[in-house]
Amino acid sequence: MTIKSAKLQSALALVMALGLSACSESDTPSSAEKQKTSEVQPQTSQELAAAFPEPLVEEEMGISRKLNTPYKDTWVVIHDANFNSMIDGRFIVMDSGSISHAFKGIMHGGMVGALAVSQTRGEIYIATTYHSRGISGERTDIIAIHDTASLEKTAEIIVPAKRGANMPFKASFRLSNDESLSFNYNFTPASSISVTDMGARKFLTEIPIPGCTLAYPMGAKGFASMCGDGTMMGVSLDASGTVIAETHSTEFNDIDKDSLFLKNARFGDRLYFPTFTGNMQPIDLSTDTPKALDKWSLLTDAERAENWRPGGWQLIAGDTGDVFYILMHPNGAEGTQKNGGPEVWIYNAAEKKRIGKIELKTWGLSLAVASDRLIVTNAEMQLDIYDLTTNTYAHTYGDGLFTPFIVYTGQGQ
Amino acid sequence: MSVFDKLVERSARKLAHNTSRRSLLTKLGMALSGAAVVPLLPVARAAAEDGGYPGVGKQSTGNLQDPGDPTSCDYWRYCAIDGFLCSCCGGSANTCPAGTEMSPITWIGTCQNPADGRAYIISYNDCCGAPECSRCMCNRNEGDRPMVRPQASNDINWCLGTTNISYTCSTAVVLGVALEE
């Protein structure tokens, strides 16, 4: 090796070492490192080298990381639909439990995609839309399949090019409860659900859901949809996607006076949908017919008089037990239902009882819960993380986000 | 019963809107309208409250009966709009910018004109086919309902039935006077 190449090697090693040190797994410099840094004075190269008799080791090139699976329960997937360039949405895997090394990886999201995760197959699915020339050309709708460890796109399933082009909704693309099928919501403006066999990676059939919208998994292989006539429709399927039963609940949604939001917190077969004026409508999906349970109020009389109301985009999130979190704002009125709010109120769903409140550091627009972390999309389009063991602000995950309106758990919920 | 169902449209221009798809949709009660996807942002609304957006020049319709600034989120026609204002993007409150096409179907709102006191049916047609304009983001939700009632939902990107689904900006076209039945 010539002296020149040795120097080049050293320079490269230094650059790599600097780069790699920035992504090492230690959260903060050790006290020894700090001390060494503070003690270093301008010296000759020889004097500096004397402090470190051995050079840095040569490092291997071409390494791409893999993520540990299954994901830790504080990991989430941020959906940044990127509204200033909607064909270029992205899904970011992020650890809400730590501010250091929080960004784990990123996947392309196409045009307002939606995400689901299979626990049994270790796969992430992104249902989305592409045109062959960016914003123009032939339209193709796909379910992209990514490996949960490498985040690489390993395959795709082409589905009918009818996906609803709308604001991001979790319920626009869901796996069946047994993970064998997926349901894609279509809107042309006729509404239907595309059913895909996720094991065989094959589109099966399209089921019309006239007057209804979205798909909330029901039973092993079925789904329920919210309907414009105030009912919920239930569709049960067999493995081939053939309809076994099609049902409707009684009418429970007064869309004019007190509309349900289409977002919910889910505990097993019970879905909790808030309403515009501050009520909670639980729906039971334990049979093949959706059943509305007793509606109850989130508000005291005094709070109702102050027009406290739920509001935001993904305004509600539930934990894995019985507790849900909901964004609330005072002085609510017709038209404030997407405004978000300055507070998150905490309820025990089974007891129909409020158990806490969090005054947000920054106005919130969407919520997600991952283990003991509450992730709030704030009005500045950054993510504020709250510690749910103390109900206090922990840190902000920021930079590189555009419009992160939806945050999924690492399990795709 | 929906406020929209109670309203009847009285407009000499109604016939002008009769593409076959639109009339079919009208019959189905799937009223027309458009406005897309970008939501909430109280920030964006707040920015507009002092009369406009930073770096965007004010405009006037020149018609005393159509008062206000079409580049301001507070302009009367925008009572249920959700998106980038075409007036800031090379179009106007009722025309699309060059290089885009207007969505044939859309959703509607009912807004009161402060000059003549009448309530008008406003069609929020999206302009489609070019990149997002990204100027003058305005989101107002008076009368907005979830997608179970698509004809009253600004959560939908109405660039469907167009050449491609790319959303550029939103218009607010006067369809006619709204009257209680």
Image (cartoon, coloured by chain):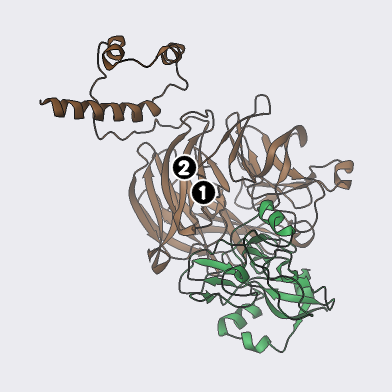
Q: Is residue A20 left or right of residue A392?
A: left
Q: Amino acid at mark 2?
A: Ile
Residue closer to the observer: B154 or A161: B154
Q: Is residue A62 left or right of residue A320?
A: left
Residue B99: % across, % down = 48, 75
User: Residue at horizontal 57%, vertical 57%?
Assistant: A167
Residue closer to the observer: A329 or A2: A2
Residue B4: % across, % down = 75, 72
Quarter-wise, where is residue B44 in the image? bottom right
* Residue that carries the numbered disc 1 in the rendered image: A80
Bin the neighbour count of mark 2 within 10 Å (Cα to Cα): few under 14, some 14-19, many 20 and up.
many
Residue A76: % across, % down = 51, 37
Q: Chain for mark 2?
A: A
Residue closer to the observer: A62 or A205: A62
Q: Chain for mark 1?
A: A
User: Secondary structure under badge 1?
Assistant: strand
- How far apart marks 2 and 1 lie (CA) works out to 8 Å
Q: Is residue A223 left or right of residue A204?
A: right
Residue A207: % across, % down = 50, 63
Q: Which mark is residue A55?
A: none
- The brown one among the chains is A
* Residue that carries the numbered disc 2 in the rendered image: A92
Q: Does the image show residue A59?
A: yes
Q: Amino acid at mark 1?
A: Asp
Above or below, comparing residue A158 to residue A189 in the picture: above
Residues indicated by labels 2 and 1 sit on the same polypeptide chain: yes
Q: Is residue A42 left or right of residue B124?
A: left
Q: Quadrant of the C terminus of chain B?
A: bottom right
Bin the neighbour count of mark 1 within 10 Å (Cα to Cα): few under 14, some 14-19, many 20 and up.
many
Q: Answer with mark 2 or mark 1, whichever residue precedes in sequence.
A: 1
